[in-house]
Each structure stands twice: as C-alpha cells, then as structure tokens.
Image (cartoon, rainbow, N blue to C red):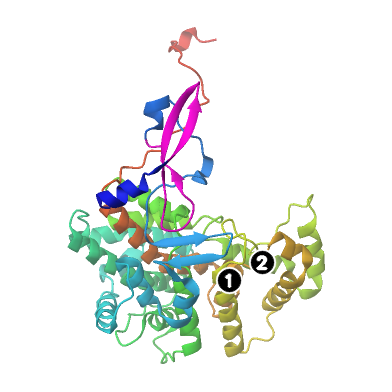
Amino acid sequence: MDATAQDKKNTKSAKLTVDGKDVALPVHDGSIGPSVMDIGKLYAQTGMFTYDPGFTSTGSCESKITYIDGDEGVLLYRGYPIEQLAEHGDFLETCYLLLYGELPNPTQKADFDFRVTRHTMVHEQMSRFFQGFRRDAHPMAVMCGSVGALAAFYHDSTDISDPLQRMIASIRMIAKMPTLAAMAYKYNVGQPFVYPKNDLDYATNFLRMCYAVPTEDYKPNPVLAKAMDRIFILHADHEQNASTSTVRLAGSSGANPFACIAAGIACLWGPAHGGANEAALKMLAEIGTVDRIPEFIKRAKDKNDSFRLMGFGHRVYKNYDPRAKLMQKTAHEVLKELGIKDDPLLDVAIELERIALHDEYFIEKKLYPNVDFYSGITLKAMGFPTSMFTVLFAVARTVGWIAQWNEMIEDPNQKIGRPRQLYTGAERRDYVQVDKRK
C-alpha cells in the first residue's frame, strides 16, 4: 500500500478509556464492509489484551480476495458476484481470478488451463503410498496424509521465498487435488486407479477418474459435469473461515504449501465446518419418509427439543445464502437428468425444502435451506457416498486456500500467528518433593 493510501486509511480513530487513561485506536476502512479498529499496540499502551473467543469480532488480516455481506446475502470473489461466476464461467476461470486478481483473457485462460491440465498426474510412487492405508479408512484421513506427503514428492516447489516455486506449487495443488480425491475414492471402493486425461475439462476429468472402470468406456454426462463444476465454483473460497484461517496460521510459520493445505483439510474435516452437507444427509435419513416430516418440523420449533434441522440457516448469512440459490437450481437439474423418482431421501429433501420456503416460522427465523442442504442432495444423486462429500469440498476450496496463502506470504505486515489468552489457572506455586506432599 502506498503512503497516500496508508494516510487515508488512518485518518479516523476510536477512543478507549482504560483506568482513566484515553487510548487512541486507529480505524481503518476497507473498500466495502465494516471498518476495523487497529489494536496492534493495545498491550503496549494499556497492558491488556482483547478477549474474543472464536475471533468473531476480530480481523486477522487484510485481504483483497473474497468479500461476504451476511446481512444482504452477498458473496464476491475479487469483486465479482458468485451468481455471475457460477452461471457464466467455469471453475478454472474462477481459479485464475482468485489467484491473479482478474478474469483471464482468452490467451491467458488457454495458457492457465493448459498448465493445470498438464499437472494433473501425480508421482507414480503415490499409488504405493496409498497401500499404507486401510481399505476402510475415511477418505478425508487419506487426503490429509496424501496431500501432506506431496512435499516429499515435489520438494522442488517448497521454497516459499521463491515466487516461481510458489506459483508452481499453486498450480500443482489445484491440478493434483482432484486426482488424489479420485484415488481416495477408488481405494475406498476397491477399484483400480484411473489416470487423468488431458483432453477433458477439469470437472469431467474428475468424474471420469471417480467412475470409469477398465472394463468399459466412460461416457461423460455434460449435465453432471456442469453441476460438478458449479459446486467447485460455489465452494472455491469463503473469506476467513476456520480452514482458511488454519492455512494462513500454518503458513505464517513458514511451513511449505503442501503442509499448509493438509492442515486446512484437517480443519475442514470437522463436522461443524466441511461436514455440514454430510450432516444434512444424515438428518434426511433420520426423518426417513415424507409422512414423518411434520413430526420433525414440530421438534425443530420446540425450544426444549435438542433436534435441529441441519442444512438450514448459516452462521454468516442472515439472509438467503447466495450459493444456495444456485445450488438449488443445480440440484433440480441433476435430479431431472438422472430421472430419480424412487429415492425416499430425495423425496424427504424436496418436501422439506418446500415447507421451509413457505412456512412462516422458517421465513421469520430466516432458516432458509443453505448450500450444504442442496449440495448433499446433489452429490448423493450423482453417486458419491457421504464420506466423499467433504473431500469434494476440499478439492474446490484448495484454490481459495492457495490464493489466501499466497496473499499472506506477500503481505509485508504478516507476522507468525500468536493469539493471546485469558489465563484462569493456578497462580505461581513452588515444587514440593513427592514424599512431602499430602
């Protein structure tokens, strides 16, 4: 940031009074969104830290990548509405945008697509690496291990001080993640690995690696490929969520990019984060049949009942999740294409969706179906087991993690992450020999 911009950024301040002493806190304005109070010197000035469990009121970094307005239901990638990107673009175009800051022209896009496509194969020794896992291992456990192991196979792109190596690592991660995800799936179901093909687009290539078998040709379905591509776009980045913050925190120590992404995958595995769509499917299975929906709706409205409708509402979005509108359209396109008419789980989902969009209780509470509700339905219809849902999330989110990691590395104000704490343990005490303790 140049001096003029920095001066403009620090023209406002907030006053904090501590024990009768006034402390001025600089206030910074972003291009859009809430302003922030800079507390970087608070401890030096007051001897105090702030206390913010979950960092819900704390800005951990300055970023130009993604903006969310939860009250208005807005999600922007580099300023572009998610609706426009998902409707008119493709995933690799979105990847280019997140990495470089601008949409590519035709020449740039062709070059980027070529570079990603030519990096989709993984080292042949990786296939033997997979044999160390049990067949029934959760695919996310396999992903944590295999992605972290990439640093052992591609150590020529782990020098984070070299911009060229950082970009090579970025392209490798985006290109190889779907290959590793497909390998995790194939290993889990006991089928042979399928190599990528350079004449296929990103989403079609991934679906082929998941579902092709040596005994017959794979026939791509353009509707399913488009759905997969759109799912990738909708999940590509989401500001400073738990897994992205984990990637940045790991990266702040100077860790190599493969280790940072593996850390992000581990965080994403949590049911409160990436496992939400899997939880929504489990809820639909618990309901079981359409005739039982009123019973569960009644339970959801009962404050004294612990039951909660999964896949409804969102921690950030207090309005309709903009991704959910697109995912809803995609879900219905997939169901229509596949002609699924006798799946009780999908029947429950469609009826639950209808009720939620018309019931006054849900509308008043703004408990709209979110992206996890629709993506779970869509992925199940496409044939993916629930254990793969979070893996697909990781494939999509890799580009966001990489873009955020690169931005962090290039930020001159970046420091190693070191949150403070409110200590409530024992005060200082002296050691007593074991034979003298009561």
User: Which residue sits at x=44%, y=47%?
Assistant: 59
Disc marking residue 262:
none
Q: Earlier in the sequence, mark 1 or mark 2?
A: 1
The x, y position of residue 245, in whole percent, is: 42, 51
Q: Residue at x 24, y 58 (%)?
A: 152
- Is residue 422 visible in the rendered image? The answer is no
The tag on residue 368 is 2
Q: Quadrant of residue 291?
A: bottom right
- Could you tell me if residue 168 is visible in this image? yes
Residue 280, x across and y down, in percent: 63, 65
Per the image, label 2 sits on a secondary structure element best described as: loop
Please tell me which residue is depicted at 29% across the width and 80% down the height of the picture: 105
> Is 118 placed left or right of 41 in the picture?
left
Mark 2 closeness class: few <14, some 14–19, many ≥20 residues within 10 Å: many
Magenta span contains residue 149 = no
Q: Residues within 10 Å of mark 1 (few under 14, many from 20)?
A: many
Label 1 sits on a secondary structure element that is helix
- Quarter-wise, where is residue 13 in the image? top left
The residue lying at 41 percent from left, 70 percent from top is: 181
State yes or no: residue 33 in magenta: yes
Mark 1: which amino acid? Ala
Q: Which residue is mark 1?
A: 324
Q: Are marks 1 and 2 in contact (CB under 8 Å)?
A: yes
**Region in magenta:** 13-40
Side of 168 relative to 205 (left or right): left
